Image: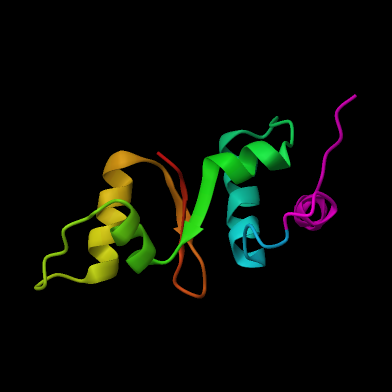
Amino acid sequence: MKQTINKFDFRDAFVRADRTNQFSNDALGLIYDYFESAEPNYDLDVDAICCEFSEQSPAAIAADYSIFIHDDEDFDTQIEDYLSENTIVIGKTDNGKFVYIQF
């Protein structure tokens, strides 16, 4: 039997799975919206989402992926361009972190 959940239920599933530190509420909202539009019949798997998605600051992404940054260009734009070329960018949180599918 399938169950339809809303954004609150989606976030609550992370609380129940003791994954409250994995993503911010803003990031969870972006991930929920992604699944609603890209995979509306997705069978919720909190552990799989935690392994597949990431929420990181531009500086952390640059360090993790050894991205060479051009000083004359906007830092965030360079990071977003890099991510867009290599994976799916889900969005950017209000606190400036990118939410993306890890690669």
Question: Against 85, is 95 above or below?
Answer: below
Q: Which residues are magenta?
A: 1-19
Q: Quadrant of residue 59?
A: bottom left
Residue 51 painted magenta: no
Q: Is residue 18 left or right of residue 68?
A: right
- Does 3 sit above or below residue 6? above
Placement of 53 over or under 1, stated as above or below: below
Q: How is the protein colored in the picture?
A: rainbow
- The single residue placed furthest to the top in the displayed view is 1
For residue 85, side relative to residue 30 (left or right): left
Q: How many marks?
A: 0
On the image, the x and y values in percent for residue 94 come to 52, 73
Image position of 14 (left or right of 27): right
Position of 74 compared to 20: left or right?
Answer: left
For the point 16% across and 63% down, the residue is 69
Q: Quadrant of the N terminus?
A: top right
Q: Nearer the viewer, residue 72 or 66?
A: 66
- Name which residue lies at 29% across and 67% down: 76
The residue closer to the viewer here, 60 or 30, is 60
Q: Looking at the image, which residue is at 34% across and 54% down? A: 64
Where is residue 53 drawn, in percent x and y?
A: 53, 46
User: In the figure, 24 relative to 13: above or below?
Assistant: below
Image coordinates for residue 89, horizontal then vertical, percent: 42, 49
Residue at 30% x, 51% y: name it. 65
Quadrant where the C terminus sits is top left
Q: Tell me where residue 80 sits by quadrant.
A: bottom left
